[in-house]
Amino acid sequence: MNKTKIEWTDYTWNPVTGCKHNCEWCYARKIANRFKNLFNDFKPTFHEHRLTEPYGRQYKPSKIFVVSMGDLFGKWVPASWIHSVIKVAEDNPQHTFQFLTKNSKRYLWFDFPKNCWIGTTVTGEKTESSSTYPRRKTIQFLSIEPLLGEPYLGRIGAYDWIIIGAMTGHGSKKHQPKKEWIDKIVEWCGGYNIPIFMKNSLSDIWGRPLIQEFPNE
């Protein structure tokens, strides 16, 4: 596991890497392209030896972003890999394991312990942000990053937490979100009493102290 600068988590843990989505704005693919030998050309890869990492006694109870360098629930990922990862979460209830995917329908295939937060990632642009899995005992969240357009929020009440972030890196100034898009998300979340976490990338656009809330606080 690695300590991370991602504001809403403490560590990243990558027992699986690689992805076939080929998203235009994927930061993970950019990193993998720089370090091809480390990431097997971003081909889906199971690193079984990393499964033991969260068991380390040196880690106090922490938030752990699972598979930041891929999509664990991509349709190409064998179910056995996913079951192996979830088993680690079951064995380590002191930690909170945070999952993100573009293929949230696949969450339906698996049972998660309470210390797992299951998230869907979208970019706005009128994207359907509805929950595709039924209410369950786990925290369910939506990550809108990078926010590239006015998001569809018709079913935002299905979520327990919303993360918002702007594009960063080379060329990002051309794709900054409008403040009114952020205002709309904040208004809707307020109506449903949903906590919001604004990433630091929104600081200049928001112009006020960032809202950085967590569920169950």
Image (cartoon, rainbow, N blue to C red):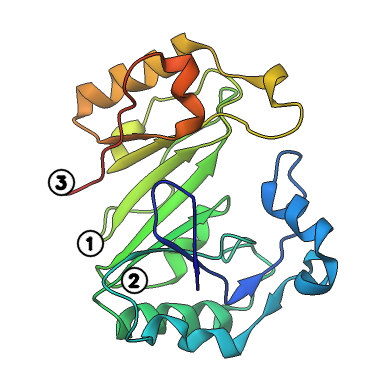
The numbered mark at residue 112 is 2
Q: CA distance from mark 2 to mark 1?
A: 8 Å
Is 132 in front, or is 84?
84
Amino acid on which the number 2 mark rests in the picture:
Phe
11 to 179, vertically: above or below: below
The image shows residue 34 at horizontal and vertical percentages of: 82, 57
The kind of secondary structure element at disc 3 is loop
Query: Is residue 68 rendered to the left or right of residue 89?
Result: right
First in sequence: mark 2 vs mark 1 = 2
Place of residue 143 in the rendered image (x, y in percent of width and height, measured from the top left): 46, 41
Q: Which residue is mark 3?
A: 217
Camera sees residue 46: yes
State which tag comes first along the sequence, 3 or 2: 2
Q: Which residue is mark 1?
A: 137
Mark 3 to mark 2: distance in Å?
Answer: 21 Å
Q: Residues within 10 Å of mark 1 (few under 14, many from 20)?
A: few
Marks 2,1: beta carbons within 8 A? yes
